[in-house]
Image (spheres, helix red, strand yellow):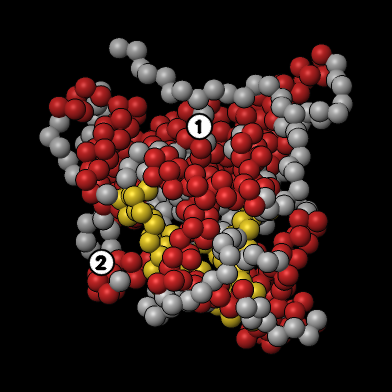
Amino acid sequence: MRSKRLPYTPIIKARYCRPLKASNISPLVLRMLRFISPFYLRFGLNFSSIELLDAERQTVNSLVSLWRDFQDGKTRLILAFRHPYGDEPQVFSYLFDVLLKNRARRDGVALRGHPHARFIHGYEVALWGGPLIRWLLPRIGAVPVYHVKADSAGIKAIRGIIRDGPHPIALAPEGQVSYRSETVPRLEAGCAQMGFWCAEELEKDGRDERVCILPLSMHHEFDPRDEKKVEKMVRALEAVCAASSPDGQVLPAAALHEQPAAPLHDRLEVLDLQMLAMAEDFYERTYGKRAKVDGHDAQSRDARWEALRHIALAEGERALGLTPHAAADEIQRVYRLRQECWDRIYSLDPARKISALERAYADRRAGEAWFAMRHMEFVDIAYYLDSDYLAGTAGDPPSFNRIAETVINLTDLAARFAGGNISNRSAVLRKRAVVIAGKPIEIRERMSAYKDNRKQAVDAVTADMKQIFLDCATALRDKELNDEY
């Protein structure tokens, strides 16, 4: 029987690069979004509800309290949100623009007007997001940044918004989607650094506002009634991958359906191994590269994934003629590959006429960049895979949330191999969003440490933020805490 093709189309034509409109909030667009958002979240992203909790269990939620202080001119506020799924900007935009006033009213706090935050986003979001996203982002006040390009004008604009803007700024300290919510794989130092820059500038101007970074931890609670949907997703993966049985034999899809039902987490571990073996085989047969790591236990699997990621990054860099930076970590190399690929795809200047042969060369560069981007897309998600995630916590079996996250990630991984990207992530499972406001980090209290050693102070704030995110995840798992909510 002929196998089913996965429906992803390569980019083989260079595209025109049209700059984003300058970021400037449109009240009309915001009103439109407030009307549309509940329907989009419900029917487009499958959210049943959004709940705002407080990790400190304060009478007044810390987000509400800090927002009131921001409106009163007492505090400059940076909202540092977890980014484990990809739909956080939509959820937080609805939370800020629609739900926050309701929560403030419940807490006995009066907020003026419609609360709104200005989001920082990677410049590439406007490229893969399509024309509607490119039109929308600047009109809601979103600000683009480059991960690896020097962008003094963009950084200056962000610093001005944090210091003087009428709306708080919201950004993801992880730098990009991190694909799992109960662990925090990696945080970047930019959020903490921006807080210190703001505090430093306020001090120079003789202003006495506090500078606070508020960690906001985002979690999906998947609906257990969707277990059959998860089962269907696992079966679809098994069919696509011809998954191995636990004894290592490769089974056809039809035979898999006849097997006695194994626990879902066991089947997902088998899928993880099969997809790893297929990827290793691809890189060995195609590029003659194979990682010299063996073993099927969790530690060995993670070592094999890591070795394979380095091979993939090296092949992507080689295809583009990039020299690896010795000090760059894997995600920084991902950023660089991503930027170079999009720059080659969006390479045409609409104001410049080119010959047919120049256009042919531009198309060829775009096509080769798209195929080089396959290495980057694989590493982008594989970096965050963790074989221990399915082991659960405290010796317990993995929660339904962890199983759901894992099956979504493995489905996404298969799509990346086949030519997809983050926009192809599944949203078929019903869930509710739980946002936990963590303990605020007061930056001006740390200015003496910053003056003594800037890097050490920034690293300390980043480490504290990571621990607060982990504490929020623990709080959500804690049944007694949930009962109090």
Residue sticking out furthest to the left: 260
Whether residue 292 is visible to the viewer of this picture, yes or no, is no
Q: Name the residue located 39 percent from the left edge and 45 percent from the top edge.
A: 42
How packed mark 1 is, by other alpha carbons closer than 10 Å (few <14, some 14-19, many 20 or more), is many
* For discs 1 and 2, the disc positioned in front in the rendered view: 1
Q: Position of residue 6 (x, y in %)?
A: 43, 23
Q: Quadrant of residue 281?
A: top left
In the rendered view, does 181 fall on the left or right side of 257?
right
In the rendered image, which quarter contains the N terminus?
top left
Q: Name the residue located 80 percent from the left edge and 82 percent from the top edge.
A: 204
Question: Mark 1 highlights which residue?
Answer: 420
- Report the front residue among 373 and 301: 373
In the rendered view, does 178 fall on the left or right side of 145?
left
Q: Earlier in the sequence, mark 1 or mark 2?
A: 2
In the rendered view, does 224 fall on the left or right side of 191?
left
Residue type at mark 2?
A: Ala
Q: Name the residue located 26 percent from the left edge and 38 percent from the top edge.
A: 229
How packed mark 2 is, by other alpha carbons closer than 10 Å (few <14, some 14-19, many 20 or more), is few
Q: Position of residue 69 (x, y in %)?
A: 58, 78
- Report the front residue among 136 and 33: 33
In the rendered view, does 386 fall on the left or right side of 194?
left
Compared with 245, 104 (above or below) is below
Compared with 378, 431 (above or below) is below
Q: Name the residue located 40 percent from the left edge and 72 percent from the top edge.
A: 106
Question: Mark 2 highlights which residue?
Answer: 394
Secondary structure under badge 1?
A: loop
